[in-house]
Image: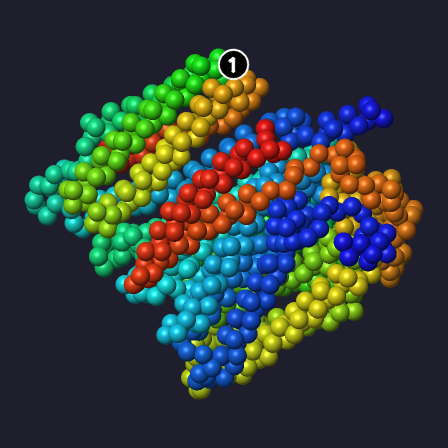
Amino acid sequence: MDHSHAMAGHAAHPAHIDTSTGLDSRKMAFWGFIGSECLLFGSLIGTYMAYKGKSINGPYPHPGIVDGKEVEGILNIPLTTASTFILLMSSVAMVLALNYTQRGERSRAFTWLLLTAFLGSIFLGCQVYEFTHFVHEGLGLGTNLFSSSFYLLTGFHGAHVTVGVIYLITLAFLVRAGKIPPEKALNVEIAGLYWHFVDVIWIVIFPLVYLIK
Amino acid sequence: MASTATVATAPHVAAHHGPTGLWSWVTTVDHKRIGIMYGVVSFIWFLVGGLEALVVRAQLAVPNNDLVSAEFYNQLFTTHAVTMVFLALMPLTAAFFNFLVPLQIGARDVAFPRLNALSFWVFFFGSLYLNSSFLLALVPGVGPQAPNGGWFAYPPVTTLAYNPGLNMDFYVLGLQIIGLSSIIASLNFIITIINLRAPGMRLMRMPIFTWMVLVTNVLIVTALAVFTIASTQLMFDRLFGSVFYDAARSGADPLLWQHLFWMFGHPEVYILILPIMGMVSEVLPTFSRKPLFGYNVMVFSGILIGWLGWGVWSHHMFAVGLGPIADTFFALGTMLIAIPTGIKIFNWLGTMWGGAIRFTTAMLFAVAFIGMFTIGGISGVMHSVAPADLQQTDTYFVVAHLHYVFFGGTVIGLWSGMYYWYPKVFGRLLDEKLGLVHFWMTLVGMNLTFFPMHFLGLYGMPRRIFTYADNMGFNEMNMLATIGSFMIGLGTLVFAFNLFTAWKRGKIAGPNPWGAATLEWSIPSPPPEYNFRELPVVRSRMPLWEGDPTKEGGIPHGRRDEDTDDVTLGGAKVATMEYPDDESKMSAHDLGIHLPPPSYWPIVLALGITMVFGMLIFRNVDGALHNLWMGSIAGILLTVYSIYRWAFEPGHGH
C-alpha cells in the first residue's frame, strides 16, 4: 500500500519529471514565447523598413541630400556602437552567471548576474540619453515616419531590456540567498534565454537602423 | 452545504469535484472549471452579438428604414463582428480546448494551470471593457461610443482626425487586452499537447481534435502577435500622437495597416475553423460507428491549411491595386487551400460511407457543417479569382461567403460539439427533441438569411450601408434575410433553454453515452477534479474501441436506430458501464494525487493588465477625467507586484 501511494505521489509531478518529450515544460514554453516575440519584433521591423526613407520632413536619421539641400543625420552612431558592444558583452556575463549557478558557486553567480544587469543598465542609460537628446533636437514621437517607427521599435526593445534588468537583479539576490541551488539552475537558464534573445534582436535592429543608410 | 442533499441523489454526480462556492471559482486553476467559465461567458457574448445582428437585420428589413441612425448602425455592425470573432467564437473554441485537451491526451491538467486562469480572467475583463463602450449611452450628453470603423479598422478613417470619439480607442485597447489573453492561452495549450501526453500517446495517436487544437494555437501565437503590433501602432497614433497611419501629416501608407491586419486576419479565419474541423472529425466517426477515414491525411491537411493560411492574406486586398504579380501569387495560393480542405471534406464523407449512422443532434449538426462549410468554401474559391473578386469586393456577396464559413462552418460545428460533449461536462444529456427543433430552425434560418445575400451582392448591394433606396430590387431578399435571422434567433433561444434546463434536469449520461473511442469518455461524467485516477497507458488511436474487433477492423457495427442507451462497446452496453463509486467519491487528497492549489493571483494580475491598457482611454477624454489615464501606471505597478507574488506563491514552485 505504501508502495503504491509513493508511486501515485511520483506520478503526480509529471510536468517536470517525465514529460512526453523529456524537456522541461517551462523551457519549452519560453521558446514558444520567443517565437511569438519574433513576430512582435518582426512586425515593428517590417514597419520600420516599409517607412525607411519615406519621411517627408526632418530631422532625418542619416546625412544626405533632400530636395537639393544637404541635411544632417540625427543618429549618433559612435555612441550607439559603444552601447551595442556593452549589451553584447552582457551576454558573456550571462553565460558565466549560468555556469556558476549550475556549479553552485553562489557568490560568483551573484556577481555575474549583477554585472549582466549592470551592463544592461548602461545600455538603457545610453538609450535614455539618446531619446532625450533627440527630443531636444526636435524629433518628437509624431514628427515624421522615421521618429514614430524608430521610437516604437527601439523603445519596445528598451522595454524588454528593462524587464530583463529587473528579472536579473531579482535572480541575483535569490541566488545569493541560496534559493536557486544547482538543480534549480533552470530558473537562471530561462532568464538567460530571454537575455540572449533581447541581444540577438538588437543585432538585427542596430545595423538596420544605424548602419544602413 | 445545502446542495449536498440534491447532489447525493445521483450516483454519477456524486463524484468528488472539489470545493464549491463563488470564491472557489474565482481562484480555481482547474482546466475543467476554466473551460466551463470560458463557455458560459462566451455564450453570453454570443447572445449579445446575435442581438446586435438582429438589430442590423431589423434596420435592413425595409428600404429607407430609420430604426437606428447611420452612426449607431456603424457601431452595431462593427461590434457584432468584433464580439462574434473575439468574444464569442474564439473563446467558445477555447472553452473546448480547456475542457477537452487534457482529458483527450490523458493529463491531470494543462502545463501551466495558473497561466490558464490568467488567460481566462484577462479575456473576461477585456470583453467587459470592450462592451462598456455601449454603456456610455447612460452618461447624459454622451451617446454610445462602441467601435464603429469595421472589425478591420482601416486607417486613416480610424485615426483621431477622422474618428475623434472614443469608439476606436475601445477597439485598440480592448483588443490588445484580449489578444494578450489568446497568446498566453495558446502557449499553454501548445506545451500541454507536446509535453503532457499520457504514456504511449504518440503524436499520431492523438485524437484529431487535439491535433487541430495544436495547429490552431500555433496560428494564434504567431498571428495575434502581428495584430498586437498593428493595434499598438494605431493606439500610439490615437493616444500619443505618433504618425504611423496619419497620411495627411506624415505621408504614411494606409496599406501598411491592411497588410498587418490581414496577416493576422486571414490566419484568424483558420483559427476559427480548424478546431471545428477537429470537432466534427470526432463526432462523425462516433455516430457512424467507424474510425475516422484517412486519419494521417486529415492531420497533414490540417497542418497544410494552417501553413498555407499564413501566406494568402493579400487576397483580402485585391481591390487596392497590388499589381498583377502579387495578385496572381495570392490568387494561386488561395486556390491551393481548396486542396487540403477538399481532402477533409471527402474524408468526412468517407467516414460516413457504409457506417451505421445514428442521427443524433450532434451528428445532424456535423453533417450540416459539411454541407454549409462546403458552400462557404466554394464561394471562397470564387473570391480567389482576382478579377471576379473586384466585382464582389465590398458587396453582400462577401457577407454571404463569410457567414457561410463562420456561421455554417464555425457556429454549426460548435453546436455539434456542444451536443456531443455537454454530457461529459455536466454529466447530463441535452434534450434531443429540443435539439431537433434547434437544429432545423438554425439550418433553415441560416440559409434563409445568408443565401439571398449572394444575389444581393451580385445585384450590387454594398456592405456596411445602413439603408437602401426603394427601387433597387433589394427589398424582397432583404426581408427574407431578416425573417431568416429571427428564425436563427428563436432557434438559439431554444438552444439556450436546452442548455439551461439539461444542467439540472437532463437525462444522466454515464461515462460514455455515445460509445465513443477517445480517453475523455473513459472517466466519469462530469470528470473528477483529478481527471484520471491513474494516468492511462495508450496503445492505439482509439483506446476505448480496443478489444472490439468489429470497430478495430473498420467495420461498422450496431443497429442504425439504436438508442443512446443501447450502444454497445466491447460487448457491453455503454449506459450500464459504471465507474466504481468508491473511487469517484474520493478526493484527490484521499487518493494521494497532488493538484495545484487555488490561487487568486491570476485574477489580480488580470486586473492589473486590464488597467494598464484600459485606463489609457482617458488620454482622449477632456477635463478633469483626463488625469485618470495615470491609472495605467498604477496598473503597471499592480502587474509587477502580482507577478512577484505569483512567482513566489507556495505550492506552485519549481
Q: Which residue does the image show at 75% across and 47% down from the upper left?
A: B17
Name the colour scheme.
rainbow
Query: Could you say which is closer to the camera, residue B300 or residue B584?
Result: B584
Count of residue discs: 1
Residue B414 x/y as whole percent: 65, 58
- Tell me the element at label 1: loop
Left or right relative to A168: residue B93:
right
Q: Is residue B48 visible?
A: yes
* Vertical placement of residue B313 versus B541, above or below: below
Residue B419 x/y as whole percent: 73, 59
Q: Which residue does the image show at 53% across and 22% down from the upper left?
A: A179
* Vertical placement of residue A198 versus A45, above or below: above
Q: Which residue does the image show at 52% across and 79% down from the upper left?
A: B58
Viewport quadrant of the N terminus of chain A: top right
Viewport quadrant of the C terminus of chain A: top left
Residue at image mark 1 = A104
Q: Chain of mark 1?
A: A
Left or right relative to B142: residue B517:
right
Left or right relative to B342: residue B326:
left
Q: Which residue does the image show at 80% across and 28% down from the upper left?
A: A5
Query: Could you say which is closer to the camera, residue B101 or residue B16?
Result: B16
**Mark 1: amino acid:** Gly
Farthest residue, direction bottom: B471
Residue B35 x/y as whole percent: 64, 50
* Vertical placement of residue B28 versus B485, above or below: above
* Vertical placement of residue B228 versus A78, above or below: below
Farthest residue, direction left: A69
Q: Is residue B219 visible?
A: no
Residue B571 x/y as whole percent: 92, 46
Query: Badge 1: few (under 14), some or many (20 or more) residues near its Cα, within 10 Å?
Result: some
Left or right relative to B392: residue B488:
right
